[in-house]
Image (spheres, helix red, strand yellow):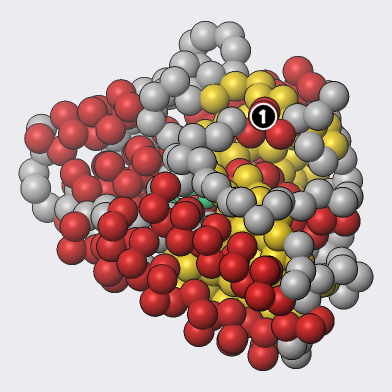
Amino acid sequence: MRVMGIETSCDETAVAVYDGEQGLLSHRLHSQVSLHQPYGGVVPELASRDHVRRLLPLVREALKAGDSSPGDIDGVAYTAGPGLIGALLVGAGFARSLAFAWGKPAVAVHHLEGHLLAPLLEADPPAFPYLALLVSGGHTQLIDVEALSRYRILGETLDDAAGEAFDKTAQLLGLPYPGGPAIARLAEQGQSGAFIFPRPMLDRPGLEFSFSGLKTAALVALRGCAPDEGARADIARGFEEAVVDTLAEKTRRALLATGHRRVVVAGGVGANQRLRARLAAVASAAGARLYFPRAEFCTDNGAMIALAGCFRLSRGEQQGLAFGARAHWELTDLTVT
Ligand code: KG4
Ligand code: ZN
């Protein structure tokens, strides 16, 4: 089965062609980063309009690069949520129409299921069950991935997501959007231990996170020191280390609690090198193996949506002609017992 995947949940327009036997054939992405940069964050209406402009050319490019014609495509998968509702509706309406025009089935995909399954795009993928640390701009969750469509949330953030904390702290430090990669770059020049920020929730049992206080701690530190590049780099370093420590320690606890031998890191913050290195150490100490998608498949992409859609279409799932999108959609709603 060969599936086209379409992702438009936020500020990336992405299209991919995935083949159930041959794997990923092509993927194309247009990032709107420069469009939103002057505003310091994503402007939903601008995002929707840009998706409209970009989708068709990307579909043509992805088909060509994947050496496929519309006749070779067996189904179209699209992100139906969660995300920005206008942006989602552009992708859903476009994908549903494309499937109709091609006379092929369409299937709705949960964006976070795409992230969770992204490591399966790589060679030597993890088998089920596995523990997943899902860290994106909107979510921070530890998930027991028992099997496809069997997801159990073990713990999640009570306030800001890890990526959101990176983005907000970056803004305080005068760094461009998106903040995660910008903080990671600045932190390289900072000194470890110059600022020691709290490790939220580590003093309590359980697998919950809280990152909103960390951003405030960074602000207090910024106000109390010389406004030079060195101090900003030290704060970036201290902040990154606090987030990474917290995520790594809760992941260690979740590995112990579940006894899983495989752990996956997914979502945009999963592209963070310091986080990957720490998680690799945690996994190895627990006798587990760490899996992660290549950096470009940690952040939003069409390949993960095509892959998740391929699984669902192969199981006979498909949407009727009516389509919809959901700004809010719990991953556990997918769980079938
Ligand atoms: O998964 P994603 O592309 O979009 C959502 O579904 O949210 O994640 C985007 C988030 C942003 O908050 C961005 O700052 C963060 O991932 N991010 C990073 C890195 N690359 C992206 N955070 C820390 N370090 C990075 N290298
Ligand atoms: Zn995402």
- Residue 112's place in the image compared with 52, above or below, is above
Please name whichever residue, 209 or 67, is drawn nearer the observer in this view of the structure.
67
**Residue positioned 78% across, 37% down in the render:** 149
The single residue placed furthest to the front in the displayed view is: 321
Q: Residue at x 24, y 34 (%)?
A: 218
> Residue drawn 66% across and 56% down?
321
**Which residue occupies the foreground of this view, 311 or 243?**
311
Is residue 46 something that shows in the picture? yes
**Does dot 1 land on a helix, a strand or a loop?**
helix
Residue toward you, 190 or 140: 140
Q: Position of residue 250 (x, y in %)?
A: 60, 25
**Is 129 situated above or below 101?**
above
Q: Residues within 10 Å of mark 1 (few under 14, many from 20)?
A: few
* Residue 214 in the image: above or below residue 205: below
Does any atom of ligand 2 lie closer than 8 Å to the CB of label 1? no
Q: Quadrant of the N terminus?
A: bottom right
The residue where tag 1 is placed is 333
Q: Residue at x 35, y 70 (%)?
A: 50
Left or right: where does residue 180 sit relative to residue 72? left
Amino acid at the residue labelled 1: Asp
Q: Based on the displayed image, in which of its 4 quarters is residue 226 positioned?
A: top left
Label count reads: 1
Percent x, y for residue 99? 68, 69
How far across and how far down the image is residue 283, in percent?
A: 73, 38
Residue 159 position, x and y percent, is 39, 24
Say left or right for 276 vs 31: right
Q: Is 91 left, or right, of 213 in this rendering?
A: right
Name the residue at the top extreme. 204
